[in-house]
Amino acid sequence: MSDSSRARIPIPRALLNHFVGRALAGRDTPIRALDIRPRDGDRFDASVTVTWPFVPPLTVSFEIERQPLFPESPILVLRWSFLGAVGALASRLTSSLQLPDGVRLDGERLLLNIPLLAARSPAGAVLGYVTLLELHTGEGQMIIEAELAMPE
């Protein structure tokens, strides 16, 4: 009998965007809507509609650069860039965003601290058992790979 359990959870685009919409609901944020479009090869695009006047929806391209390592370095690192002509304007506007605890911009990288982001959710209670947590993408879906084990 094994003391660990592994899971691969595909999340279709529609369900992913439903979760994102619920997370944004009722929050004081300049983001009015977010549409995530997963692509093959650990990449995804996000169409961001902001509340700022005269700013059209922005398309941001993301590539997973580094997976978190548990427990040593539980940070997911994404490389991002704006697509289209409004990219230069949008890059300047990102400095005015109030990011939640656990989210940090570092140049062209977005760093997501998994324990800080999960701390206020039911997932926070499970993090002590996580030995592997990776985010991957396929066309039209995000894929979470996780492994849980009893602490030594």
Image (cartoon, rainbow, N blue to C red):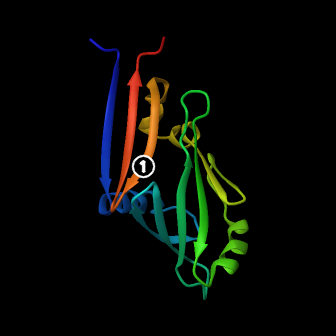
Q: Is residue 87 left or right of residue 5?
A: right
User: Counting other residues with Cα less than 10 Å from the Cα at mark 1, is it few (<14), some (14-19), or many (20 or more)?
Assistant: many
In the depicted structure, whether residue 9 falls above or below residue 15: above
Residue 104: x, y in percent? Answer: 67, 52
Residue 69: x, y in percent? Answer: 55, 33
In the depicted structure, whether residue 101 falls above or below residue 25: above
In terms of secondary structure, where does tag 1 sit?
A: strand
Q: What's the residue at 39%, 59% (across, down)?
A: 40
Disc 1 marks which residue? 136
Residue at the extreme left:
1
Q: Is residue 114 left or right of residue 149?
A: right
Q: Is residue 8 left or right of residue 68?
A: left
Quarter location, residue 88: bottom right
Q: What's the residue at 58%, 65% (across, down)?
A: 29
Residue 36: x, y in percent? Answer: 43, 65
Residue at the extreme bottom:
54
Q: Which amino acid does the dot numbered 1 rest on?
A: His
In the depicted structure, whether residue 151 falls above or below residue 52: above
Q: What's the residue at 50%, 40% (across, down)?
A: 118
